[in-house]
Image: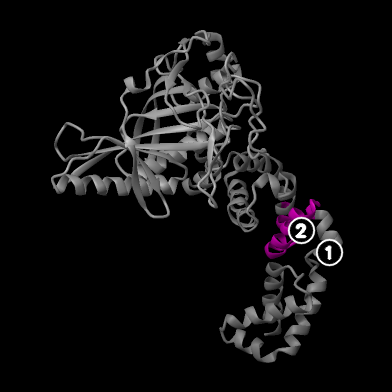
């Protein structure tokens, strides 16, 4: 029997604020355990929370970028559960009046476009972090993360494959980066994902029992978890067993999941409006201001790069994966060629996708850490265009510029790397090579093109690699023709 799979995602995103959601404690990652907490975020009796306005603004920004309607009236609610990483024994969230509703995100996978509905986006506080001591049976708690502002993005069950889930998460992460809502560093936990999955026999209308897998922190883990859970549920149904309504934990190293607990109904959490936080209004003027100042989103940027710069689709996808890269590209292109012609655009794109990306990968750093500026790269290409240096020299100079911060012209002068493009100087070298290599000369005259490559190599050797190879090639052939 064929089965259909339906996946909904719950994505928790740490907002890029300097302080926590309800207090003034810092949100710096990697600080000493329990050094960024106070009576409010540790739930001490009598401590009263105060809403962080910046978090509200960032939530609205995320909602607009994801095509949501923004709720004017908002309230905060208590979700009651007992767990050691939640110091208050409840979480402050938005159950009844989420700040954003009814959005969507368009994705593309394997040439097919699809719209994934977004049910809601709500504000809530993060819990602390449990640290399991491997040398003993003790579990330690770090409350630095408790109270950090989150948005939870809840999708409709419109995702049907692991590939679609990955495409959705990649595009979502890119949007959140572009608008500056979060740094979305999955390795630091600032983007985490829960997977809700159910199956049904093809052709039926009623979905099967849903399971949830918690806190997946990589795209690879999400993809593998979906595939495994899909196969597990099908196997249960095929054997005549029932799929349990439960929460499961995914172990990516073992490529399997484990039961954590039976799933809970809403009444289990005993939701009610938080009495310490008054409802708040998101004014239309704030929504309008955020909408007007919204930066260009990835999808629009891809379309513009194709139409404005005539870049191939592959180039646009590679460049747009990083906002830093696209900003660098456009600044570099403007310095190199104010007309921004398709040819110049492709030249700059090739640099960034080629040698620059290779250096970033080899050094495992970001573009802003490389020591290269748009002025450096545009100047480097101008030297190639003038014939001052060759393409191979330019790659060597690029590395030196990145290591030292020096401009290409400084490196060329200090290292003596300027190409020899003087016709008379090159002719004298070429004549010497012809005199010393009668055999290859005759081979070339006999139609053996490889002989020319050998002789140009001799010219490069005699000039220490500084001869302009294109000019040397033309002059060499002219000299041999004269010799005939």
Q: Residues within 10 Å of mark 2 (few under 14, many from 20)?
A: some
Residue 386 painted magenta: yes
Q: Nearer the viewer, residue 145 or 347?
A: 145
Give percent across and percent down for residue 209: 23, 35
Residue at point 30%, 45% (across, down): 229
The residues tagged by marks 2 and 1 sit, at their Cα atoms, a distance apart of: 10 Å
Point out the image quarter for the C terminus.
Answer: bottom right
Name the residue that disc number 2 marks: 400
Which is nearer the eye, 86 or 136? Answer: 136
Mark 1 lies on residue: 415
Write down the quadrant of residue 395 in the picture: bottom right
- Residue 406, numbered label: none
Q: Quadrant of residue 399?
A: bottom right
Dots 2, 1 in contact, CB < 8 A: yes
Q: Position of residue 414 (x, y in %)?
A: 86, 61
Examine the residues drawn in magenta and state their main secondary structure. helix
Q: Which residues are magenta?
A: 382-408
Q: Nearer the viewer, mark 2 or mark 1?
A: 2
The colour mode here is: one colour
Disc 2 element: helix
Name the spot of residue 311 as percent of width and height, x first.
52, 45
Residue 397 located within the stretch drawn in magenta: yes
- SS at mark 1 in the image: helix
Query: As drawn, which residue projects farthest toward the front?
Result: 137
């Amino acid at each position: 029997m064929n089965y259909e799979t339906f996946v909904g995602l719950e994505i928790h995103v740490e907002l890029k604020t300097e302080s926590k959601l309800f207090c003034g404690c810092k949100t710096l990652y990697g600080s000493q355990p329990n050094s960024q907490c106070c009576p409010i975020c540790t739930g001490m009796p009598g401590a009263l929370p105060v809403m962080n306005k910046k978090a509200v603004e960032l939530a609205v920004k995320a909602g607009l970028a994801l095509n949501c309607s923004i709720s004017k009236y908002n309230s905060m609610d208590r979700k009651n559960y007992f767990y050691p990483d939640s110091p208050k024994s409840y979480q402050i969230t938005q159950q009844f009046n989420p700040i954003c509703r009814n959005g969507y995100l368009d994705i593309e996978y394997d040439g097919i476009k699809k719209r994934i509905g977004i049910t809601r986006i709500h504000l809530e506080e993060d819990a602390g972090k449990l640290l399991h001591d491997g040398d003993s049976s003790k579990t330690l708690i770090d409350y630095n993360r408790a109270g950090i502002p989150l948005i939870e993005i809840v999708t409709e069950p419109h995702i049907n494959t692991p590939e679609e889930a990955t495409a959705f998460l990649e595009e979502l992460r890119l949007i959140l980066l572009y608008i500056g809502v979060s740094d979305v560093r999955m390795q630091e936990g600032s983007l985490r994902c829960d997977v809700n999955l159910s199956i049904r026999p093809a052709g039926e209308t009623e979905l099967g029992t849903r399971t949830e897998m918690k806190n997946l922190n990589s795209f690879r883990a999400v993809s593998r978890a979906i595939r495994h859970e899909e196969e597990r549920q099908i196997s249960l149904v095929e054997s005549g067993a029932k799929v349990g309504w439960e929460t499961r934990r995914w172990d990516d190293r073992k490529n399997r999941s484990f039961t954590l607990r039976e799933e809970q109904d809403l009444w289990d959490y005993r939701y009610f409006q938080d009495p310490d936080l008054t409802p708040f209004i998101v004014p239309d003027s704030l929504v309008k201001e955020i909408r007007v100042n919204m930066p260009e989103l990835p999808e629009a940027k891809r379309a513009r790069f194709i139409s404005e710069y005539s870049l191939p689709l592959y180039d646009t996808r590679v460049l747009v994966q990083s906002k830093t890269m696209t900003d660098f590209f456009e600044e570099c292109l403007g310095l190199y060629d104010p007309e921004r012609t398709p040819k110049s655009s492709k030249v700059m794109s090739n640099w960034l996708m080629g040698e620059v990306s290779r250096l970033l990968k080899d050094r495992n750093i970001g573009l802003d850490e490389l020591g290269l500026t748009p002025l450096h790269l545009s100047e480097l290409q101008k030297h190639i265009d003038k014939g001052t240096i060759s393409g191979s020299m330019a790659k060597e100079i690029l590395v030196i510029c990145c290591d030292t911060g020096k401009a290409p012209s400084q490196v060329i002068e200090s290292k003596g790397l300027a190409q020899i493009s003087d016709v008379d100087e090159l002719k004298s070298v070429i004549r010497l090579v012809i005199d010393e290599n009668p055999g290859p000369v005759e081979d070339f005259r006999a139609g053996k093109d490889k002989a020319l490559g050998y002789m140009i190599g001799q010219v490069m050797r005699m000039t220490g690699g500084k001869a302009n190879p294109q000019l040397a090639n033309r002059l060499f052939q002219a000299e041999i023709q004269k010799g005939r």
